[in-house]
Image: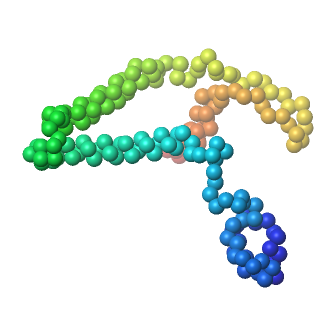
Amino acid sequence: MADSSVSSPRRMLSLSKERASVSLLDPDEKASAFVVSEEHGPKPSEVYGFVGSISAVVATAIFLAWAYIPENWLHFLGITYYPSRYWAMAAPAYAMVTIFLAMGFYLGLNFMVTPPPTTLNTIFDEYSREPSPFMASCEGIDQPIEPISDIPLSHINDLMFDHCNKDYKKLKKEV
């Protein structure tokens, strides 16, 4: 029979004769079935998130009720002071236009700040490092890691496009 004292990350159901009760909890877990934070209560961010989500749902329900319920029903309920119905359409429209203009402004600002593709600033900057001559003093497996540097663009082009150049030369020789 399996040893019940083995520490396993799985929860185990023990129906052995040694124990009179059924255990569904890990032996390492606390006696409490739920975890309580160290400060004995919910975190403030959880409370603010809960209150914020409930407030958003209530505000949306009130807005939709005000926008769609006819005025005579609102007067019958005793609600006589509320904003003009014009704002039921104008406020969301203004919000959408403001968001659209902000996104356009942000995109334009990024285009203004980005250097043109023909400048060398897109390839080199003040933090660029040329590879230093590295002499490995150790032989075998324990060689040190080379110092950090930028890989030259000519080396990248050779690695990526050298096979195209070889294929082109082969085709040129055949013709």
- In the image, residue 92 lies at what x, y percent? 24, 36
Q: Pinpoint residue 115: horizontal percent, then vertical percent.
A: 46, 20
Q: Report the number of discs.
A: 0
Closest to the observer: 70 or 145?
Answer: 70
Q: Is residue 108 above or below residue 78?
A: above
What colour scheme has been applied to the protein in the rendered image?
rainbow
Q: Position of residue 82 (x, y in %)?
A: 18, 35
| Among the 4 quarters of the image, the one containing residue 91 | top left
> Which residue is drawn at the image coordinates 19% and 43% (left, top)?
66
Name the one closer to the observer, 17 or 160. Answer: 17
Q: Which quarter of the image is occupied by the N terminus?
A: bottom right
Percent position (x, y) of residue 160?
A: 58, 39
Answer left or right for 151 relative to 92: right
Identity of the residue drawn at 37% across and 27% down: 107
Residue at 12% x, 43% y: name it.
Answer: 75
Which one is nearer the viewer's eye here, 98 or 16? 16
- Residue 169 seen in this snapshot: no
Question: Outermost residue, left direction?
Answer: 72
Residue nearer the viewer, 60 or 135: 60
* Horizontal relation, residue 96 to residue 132: left or right: left
Image point 14% across, 38% down: which residue?
80
- Kindly tell me whether residue 150 is visible in this rendering: yes
Q: Quadrant of residue 138?
A: top right
Eyeballing the image, is 41 above or below 23? above
Above or below, comparing residue 13 to residue 165 in the picture: below
Residue 89 image-quadrant placement: top left
